[in-house]
Amino acid sequence: MTSVLGFLVTLLLLVPPFWKLWSRTGHSGLWSLLMLIPLVNIIMPFWLAFKRWPSEESGVGIVERFE
């Protein structure tokens, strides 16, 4: 019973924020389910952090967004 509870807590803590991040990058939010796989959940945030984001592709820079 406790392992099921631990899985549900992990599911609730990891999936929603990463679902939002993947959606913002133009990908399906289903990619966030990969966060439930050991070792993949360490690699995926790094890949997400260093990939090209839609704002970079459209040419909008950080200076332009805050002016």
Image (spheres, rainbow, N blue to C red):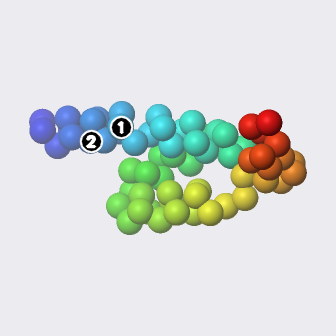
Question: From what the image shows, is residue 56 above or below residue 64?
Answer: below
* Depicted 50 relative to depicted 18: above or below: below
Relative to 15, residue 38 above or below: below
Residue at image point 47% right, 65% down: 43
In the image, what residue occupies the spot 20% across and 35% down? 5
Task: Please tell me whether mark 2 sits on a helix, a strand or a loop.
Answer: helix
Report the side of 15 relative to 6 (left or right).
right
The answer to which quarter of the image holds residue 28 is top right
Which residue occupies the foreground of this view, 19 or 59?
59
**Viewer can see residue 53:** yes
User: Mark 2 is on which residue type?
Assistant: Phe
Residue 49 point in image, percent of width and height: 58, 58
Question: Dot 2 corresponds to which residue?
Answer: 7
Please report the residue visible at 80 percent of the width from the left and 36 percent of the height from the top.
67
Residue 42: x and y in percent read 41, 62
Q: Name the residue under label 1.
A: 13
Contact check, label 2 and label 1, Cβ < 8 Å: no
First reached walking from the N terminus: tag 2 or tag 1: 2
What amino acid type should be assigned to the residue bearing mark 1?
Answer: Leu
Question: Looking at the rendering, which quadrant does residue 21 occupy?
Answer: top right
